[in-house]
Image: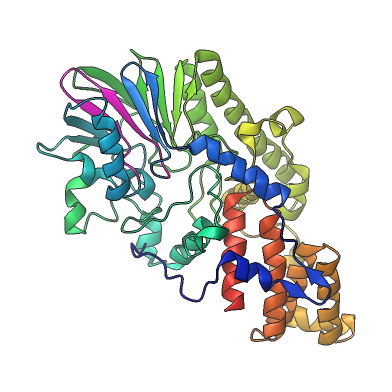
Amino acid sequence: MSTQRPSTTGFRTAAAVLALCAVATFQLPAQETTAEATLRARASEFAREVVRVTPDVYTAVGYSPANVSMIVGDDGVIIIDTAMSPAHAAEIVKAFREITALPVKGIIYTHGHGDHTGGTAAFVDGAMPEIWARDNLGAEDRPLLAAGLTIQQQRGVRQAGFALPDDLRINNGIAPPMRPGRADAFGTAVSRAADQARVETSPNHTFSRERQTITIAGRTLELVQSPGETDDQLYVWYPAAGVLFAGDNYYKSFPNLYAIRGTPYRDVLAWANSLDKMINEQPRAVVPGHTRPVLGPTAAVGALTRLRDAIAFVHDKTVEGMNKGLTPDALVQYVQLPPELARDPDLGEYYGRVDWAVRSIFTGYLGWYDGNPTQLSPLSPTEEARRLAALAGGQDKLLAQARQALAAGDTQWAAQLADHLLALNSDDQTVRLLKADALTVLARDSVNALARNYYLTVAAQLRQ
């Protein structure tokens, strides 16, 4: 992915964007929505602080989208993940230096996402530390790079809200609303290795076995394979302190079992199984890849268990529905979290969503065909739109129906009708603005930060 900051040319301030949101009798309310207030309250989960997890373990939260941890050893320190950029990492180094001046002897990457690996250079000062990762670091991006796919760059910018003005961004559900700058929030250390300035940050120690025991600065750690959000994921188990560093297989939100920027299939069952392994360690504290550490054995094991239960339930219920012959559209109605899990604030859909996961599980196992033979050779979007317009009595009447739907709060239907109209004339500015207004309402009513960002970014592009 590109490491250049996305241009915001043509994007207006939030006030100007909201002022444009008027179609017919529709007027977007100016006051904060319930979803926006809920998302804003998430800021406490990543308020900037160096959290003392144990006497020799510290985690920097809120300095960068991803957490960075430090284990203080006998003659040096071990760093787990390194932030999104050298600028972010430099601030963390300064904060850590207020705790200890010992040199960095080891660095561990829990996985290859750039928000966890982009700041390594700031931690390398003097002798090169041991840099550990699994031998398949960057596994998520490799097939995309090999195929020459670039669309995920655009979709990643939309998902993260990087092209939005600051006053439209609240947060990313599990992280503060920062921008990548020189680093790429969704790239990998491997994909950046050709950049001469960053070659030194590639791992110089890797492992392929299930569990690798290492000793650095007098501290013995176990690095354990734990595929989940990415196939290259590992967790770090520090048995002497009872601390488990979970990487992105645990954070306080329903997880991103599918990322709307587009990724290869994330093995949902493997993710649940990896959480089983973490639970079996019986940690006294869990440090997530994002959001604040969970302290105390009851809380730590309970948090991992509830997430494992939620993921396993969604997987198993989806498979159950698939075996009944349900299509993805029917499955998203069929698969609902049990009330005790749905009520858990740490499983709110701030980052991932159950319905996205259901669709991904179906496609991951069975591919695009939903089993309905009507879908084997469907009409083109343009032809379907032409016939729908004819049923409505013409395009003008279809547009009137879209406007009525928007005014009545039937926003998803308004957006879908706008898509039909745009299939007939993609340059119709009236329809583009109507769809932009519908997407803005959907954004402001979404507690999922990634959906909000994507809606708002596309809405802004439609208004340009």
Residue 300 is left or right of residue 455, and the answer is left
The one nearer the camera, 317 or 400, is 400
Can you give x and y, in whole percent of width and height, for residue 437 in the image? 70, 70
Can you give x and y, in whole percent of width and height, for residue 241 in the image? 36, 14
Residue 113 is left or right of residue 427, and the answer is left
Can you give x and y, in whole percent of width and height, for residue 127 in the image? 9, 36
Residue 365 is left or right of residue 223, and the answer is right
Q: Vertically, is 396 above or below 143? A: below
Q: Is residue 456 magenta?
A: no
Placement of the N terminus among the 4 image quadrants: bottom left
Task: Mark yes or no: residue 419 visible.
Answer: no
Residue 348 is left or right of residue 208, and the answer is right
Placement of the C terminus among the 4 image quadrants: bottom right
The one nearer the camera, 157 or 319, is 157
Which range is magenta? Answer: 65-83
Tell me the residue at 13%/38% (across/down): 128
